[in-house]
Image: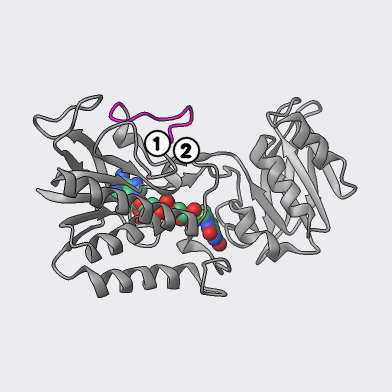
Amino acid sequence: MYDLMIIGGGPAGVAAAVYAARKRLKTILITEDIGGQSVVSEGIENWIGTPKVHGADLAKSFAAHLDAVKSDIVTLALHERVASLTPAEGGSASGGKAIGFVATTKTGKGFTARAVLIASGAGRRKLDVPGADKFENKGVTYCASCDGPLFGGMDVAVIGGGNAGFETALQLLAYAKSVTLIHRHKEFKADAVTVKKATAHPNMRVIAHAEPTEVMGEQFVTGLKYKDIDSGEIKEIAVSGIFAELGVLPNTDFVEGLVELDTVNRVKADPRDQRTSTDGLWAAGDCTDELYHQNNIAAGDGVKALEDIYLWIKKQ
Ligand SMILES: Cc1cc2nc3c(=O)[nH]c(=O)nc-3n(C[C@H](O)[C@H](O)[C@H](O)COP(=O)(O)OP(=O)(O)OC[C@H]3O[C@@H](n4cnc5c(N)ncnc54)[C@H](O)[C@@H]3O)c2cc1C
């Protein structure tokens, strides 16, 4: 049995693994890959201490850091996806004190540890229209705080009329030439205050009751086609950037029933120490219900969790 199992190799999982190695906790890190979501980013400009780094290079530096400290104390189960996590025999999923947990991967491998850190992150709900895949990171993006400044002085579109859509629009209005928000319904899901603030801006335009049908472009995005649901007419706007804010899908299917989740299936975690509702289980990064999701925050969560896990294990 390992002291600790970390599930996920993004910034949260890797930061935790580095701390686990330094604290000499016998650890298994199970992950499909090292690097996490921003591996596809052309340029990350807010990883503290590094003015600009390509996502793939950031992933390489995570792997190098891990290699430098892991020694024989942190074992890597790479290219493995956890399919289920259950209390080890004698443990209990709720209320009682679990003595450990067993993870089973899709390939059928089993791993047991006394403590588990869930750092499995999330994926963005993708824009599902022709051209969206082809132009991803060539104008189509899923992260305004990451990529927004690249579109300074340009016309951009935001897809989605929830809070995320309107907040993204507000962020973009600070530097974009114009922002057009496209929303499928007549009513917005976003708070009235946020809608009012965005729509009051002279460079903001809202197209409600419309749905995107195609991303246009050559090398990069040049426009977006959408259907006016009332008339059925297909229309087109010229934009250089398309920010899809269609919701986030946390990678938490393997802990359903084991730990308390919020209404959108994110693990509820205490922001002071990253503990979850189940003793022996911690969660960090984008798979949690914290308000803000960024690389630095995920890494910080992983560190916080490890400080707490270390004390918890020493007390057992
Ligand atoms: C395109 C894009 C660009 C971004 N750019 C920036 C940026 O410039 N700056 C910034 O601060 N943030 C950026 N972000 C946000 C940032 O990437 C996330 O906040 C951060 O990656 C969250 O880290 P994490 O470790 O919690 O999860 P993730 O990065 O999502 O990592 C999760 C890890 O868990 C693994 N995993 C998932 N499920 C399982 C499972 N069942 N079993 C085993 N392994 C599993 C995955 O393979 C992955 O290794 C960007 C996001 C996107 C999508």
Secondary structure of residue under mark 2: loop
Q: Which residue is drawn at 52% across and 74% down?
A: 50
Q: Tag 2: Cα neighbours inside 10 Å, few (<14), some, or many (≥20)?
A: many
Farthest-out residue, front:
315
Give the camera-side residue of 109 and 50: 50
Q: Residue at x 57, y 66 (%)?
A: 46
Res 118 → quadrant: top left
Give the camera-side residue of 134 and 108: 108
State if disc 2 and disc 1 touch (CB < 8 Å).
yes
Res 20 → quadrant: bottom left
Indicate whether residue 261 is drawn in magenta. Answer: yes
**Residue where numbered disc 2 is placed:** 289
Mark with earlier residue (1, 2): 1
The colour mode here is one colour
Indicate whether residue 67 is drawn in magenta. Answer: no
Farthest-out residue, right:
202
Determine whether 48 is above or below 3 in the image.
below
**Residue where numbered disc 1 is placed:** 267
Amino acid carrying label 1: it is Val
Q: Residue at x 64, y 54 (%)?
A: 144
